Image (cartoon, rainbow, N blue to C red):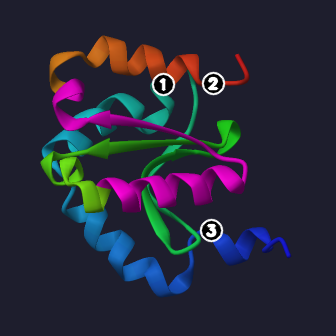
Amino acid sequence: MMLKRQQIHTRKELKEYRKFLRENMTLAEAFLWNFLKAKKLEGKRFTRQHSIGNYIVDFYCVSEKLIVELDGQVHLNSTIEEKDLKRTRYLESLGFNVIRFENKMVFDFLPTVLKEIKDNFKTP
């Protein structure tokens, strides 16, 4: 059974946690957000700390069904990697495209990160 849009997006019970995450972004998230907010990347609108199902994704572009996730050191743990894979599979099963970058990539290779995000746009 497919959930209705309002049932999987921005669930009310996650509202306070989403707000907390927006107010306490990692340095990498805050840095990348400067290049995604206000339709700065190819005129695409991104939201940050958007919930889909029981998950809160770092960045989400509605028009592209694209999710951008940033991973810090904690994600290099095999247990966390397994949870990330389960999360990615769930989101992909709903038709979303999920791309991931290590935090370090955002700082050291920003043009490459932005290009990869653009390369995942379906519409010009």
Label the magenta part by its dominant secondary structure: helix
Residue closer to the observer: 10 or 55: 55
Badge 1 density bin: few <14, some 14–19, many ≥20, Cα 10 Å? some
Residue identifier under label 3: 9
Q: SS of the residue at dot 2?
A: loop
In the rendered image, the vertical position of residue 82 relative to residue 17, given as above or below: above
Q: Secondary structure at mark 3?
A: loop
Q: Are marks 2 and 1 in contact (CB under 8 Å)?
A: yes
The crowd level at tag 3 (other Cα within 10 Å; few <14, some 14-19, many 20+) is: some
Q: Which residue has dot 2 on it? A: 121
Secondary element type, mark 1: helix
> In this figure, which residue is indicated by the disc labeled 1?
117
Gap between marks 2 and 1 measured at Cα: 7 Å
Q: For label 2, count other residues whose C-alpha is less than 10 Å away and answer few (under 14), some (14-19) or many (20+).
A: some
Q: Residue at x 75, y 68 (%)?
A: 5
Q: Tell whether 17 sits left or right of 62.
A: left
Of the residues shown, which amino acid type is indicated by label 3? His
Percent position (x, y) of residue 14?
Answer: 45, 80
Is 33 situated left or right of 59 in this image? left
Magenta run includes residue 9:
no
Question: x, y percentage for residue 54?
Answer: 51, 75
